[in-house]
Image (cartoon, rainbow, N blue to C red):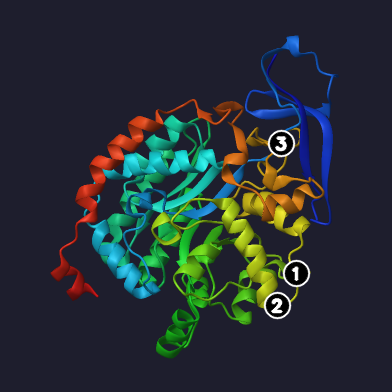
């Protein structure tokens, strides 16, 4: 007896080369354990042979969204630091982060995971502190995560050893839903020796690296002026690129950097709302993809984005690239949907297991109600997913074959309790000594 049957849904299917998107009508999806067993026309499968069933009534089934770069517990700082450029914003946030406790991280992670579940995000690559507490939150909510404990060079090799212990303890836990990664902050906050040691450690542990790099043209120019090489070249020379690497942002890369990256197993985590909000440069998404480098959607933290809404990232990415090239044909709906699904899965390091609704893939999928007014008329569902979609159109979320949200009700965690605990954290975290802030800035 199989575990779950989703009856009478539409299914989003994207060609491997991104050349076309097909909407299969009147389909049933059968799930055995944590994997998709079959996608077939409605009525072939006998519902009595399944432990549980969902009557989709024509809703659209698509792969769960993947957030390839976030600082999820930063939801605790949402709205506190506004209208500042990147450097001032970072200084302000870093000062506030010194007050974070393990409990803050736990409740902030839960709040952010709830926000993402409600928007159809089933997986996140998170880069933050006290990640053992973040892992506990992921375990409870039932989502999937790639967790990296953020490290800075001034913390010394002891921090690398502590992160290695975290990697060993949590890798593959929660039935494989939790994976781990090394997470040095950036080349400008980690010296070369620290990066080399991190790279060697990642190789020994058999994991990748998740790092901020070339966030702006200014960072690249500063590195060229002071060292004669770009931040991407720093990663190459220190061995970081020798392991699978998630590169957060990469808005300031040069064409020569893209050529370097194309030779390694790398992926770009793209968070366009943060770039717009902080007045940053826009990443060359089409150049990355033309070089064979996958691009994944990301939100960054809610302190610079204000939401963890991947649909918004998808929309802004597509519009910004059209504007960047002054060409409305850039990133058509077929390619943008591929980025949201298959390419994000590749950046996440699970391109052979996530990003498709297909037999033997993990059963991470969402059901979307396309009957809302803003979807009508339904001439072009793939385009609607980019330009019309709202997070609350997501009605049901399934991760690892288990229903974690149904009919907008989260089944694994008490949302009211989480909000209550978060409110008790916020008063302390929102207060910052004005003298300290002036000195820091």
Q: Tell me which corner region of the image, top left, top right, bottom left or bottom right, holds residue 326.
A: bottom right
Q: Relative to residue 324, is residue 248 drawn left or right?
A: left
Please tell me whether mark 2 sits on a helix, a strand or a loop: helix
Instruction: Mark 2 or mark 3: name the one nearer the start of the chain.
Output: 3
Q: State the CA–CA distance, disc 2 to disc 3.
A: 32 Å
Q: Is residue 132 visible?
A: no
Residue found 42% across the figure and 44% down from its top = 112
Residue at image mark 3: 61
Residue 164 against residue 156 in the figure, above or below:
above
Residue found 73% across the figure and 70% down from its top = 290
Q: Tell me which corner region of the image, top left, top right, bottom left or bottom right, holds residue 406.
A: top right
Instruction: Mark 1 or mark 3: name the one nearer the start of the chain.
Output: 3
Q: Tell me which corner region of the image, top left, top right, bottom left or bottom right, holds residue 192.
A: bottom left
Residue found 75% across the figure and 45% down from its top = 376
Tag 3: Cα neighbours inside 10 Å, few (<14), some, or many (≥20)?
Answer: many
Residue at image mark 2: 325
Number of numbered discs: 3
Q: State the CA–CA distance, disc 1 to disc 3.
A: 26 Å
Please tell me whether mark 3 sits on a helix, a strand or a loop: strand
Q: State the CA–CA distance, disc 1 to disc 2.
A: 7 Å
Question: Can you say which quadrant of the picture contains the N terminus?
Answer: top right
Q: Relative to residue 46, is residue 179 drawn left or right?
A: left
Please state the horizontal and vertical placement of residue 115, each as a whole percent of the image: 47, 42
Residue at image mark 1: 330
Tag 1: Cα neighbours inside 10 Å, few (<14), some, or many (≥20)?
Answer: some
Please tell me whether mark 1 sits on a helix, a strand or a loop: loop
- The reply to whether dot 1 and dot 2 touch (C-beta < 8 Å) is yes
Mark number, residue 270: none
Please state the horizontal and vertical placement of residue 194, each as a whole percent of the image: 36, 66
Q: Relative to residue 110, is residue 398 drawn left or right?
A: right
């Amino acid at each position: 007896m199989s575990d779950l049957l989703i009856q009478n849904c539409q299914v989003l299917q994207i060609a491997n080369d991104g050349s076309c998107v097909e909407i299969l009508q009147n389909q049933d999806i059968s799930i055995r354990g944590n994997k998709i067993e079959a996608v077939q026309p409605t009525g072939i499968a006998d519902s009595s042979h399944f432990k549980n069933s969902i009557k989709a009534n024509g809703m659209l089934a698509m792969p769960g969204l993947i957030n390839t770069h976030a600082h999820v517990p930063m939801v605790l700082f949402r709205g506190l630091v506004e209208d500042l450029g990147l450097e001032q914003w970072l200084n302000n946030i870093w000062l506030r982060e010194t007050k974070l406790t393990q409990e803050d991280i736990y409740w902030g992670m839960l709040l952010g995971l709830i926000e993402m579940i409600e928007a159809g995000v089933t997986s996140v690559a998170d880069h933050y502190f006290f990640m053992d507490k973040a892992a506990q939150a992921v375990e409870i909510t039932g989502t999937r995560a790639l967790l990296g404990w953020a490290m800075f060079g001034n913390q010394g090799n002891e921090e690398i050893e502590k992160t290695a212990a975290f990697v060993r303890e949590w890798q593959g836990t929660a039935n494989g839903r939790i994976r781990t990664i090394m997470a040095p902050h950036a080349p400008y906050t980690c010296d070369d020796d620290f990066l080399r040691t991190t790279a060697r450690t990642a190789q020994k542990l058999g994991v990748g690296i998740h790092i901020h790099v070339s966030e702006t043209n200014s960072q690249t120019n500063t590195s060229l002026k002071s060292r004669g090489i770009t931040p991407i070249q720093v990663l190459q020379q220190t061995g970081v690129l020798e392991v699978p690497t998630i590169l957060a942002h990469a808005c300031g890369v040069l064409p020569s950097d893209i050529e370097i990256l194309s030779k390694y197993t790398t992926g770009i985590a793209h968070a366009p709302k943060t770039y717009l909000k902080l007045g940053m440069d826009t990443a060359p998404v089409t150049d990355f993809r033309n070089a064979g480098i996958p691009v994944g959607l990301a939100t960054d933290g809610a302190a610079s984005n204000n939401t963890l809404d991947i649909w918004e990232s998808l929309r802004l990415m597509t519009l910004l690239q059209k504007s960047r090239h002054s060409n409305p044909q850039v990133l058509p709906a077929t390619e943008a949907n591929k980025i949201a699904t298959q390419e994000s899965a590749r950046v996440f390091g699970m391109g052979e297991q996530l990003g498709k609704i297909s037999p033997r893939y993990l059963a991470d999928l969402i059901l979307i109600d396309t009957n809302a007014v803003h979807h009508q008329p339904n001439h072009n569902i793939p385009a609607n997913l980019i330009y019309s979609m709202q997070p609350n159109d997501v009605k049901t979320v399934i991760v690892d074959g288990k229903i974690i949200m149904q009919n907008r009700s989260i089944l694994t965690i008490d949302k009211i309790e989480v909000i209550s605990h978060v409110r008790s954290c916020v008063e302390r975290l929102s207060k910052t000594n004005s003298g300290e802030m002036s000195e820091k800035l």
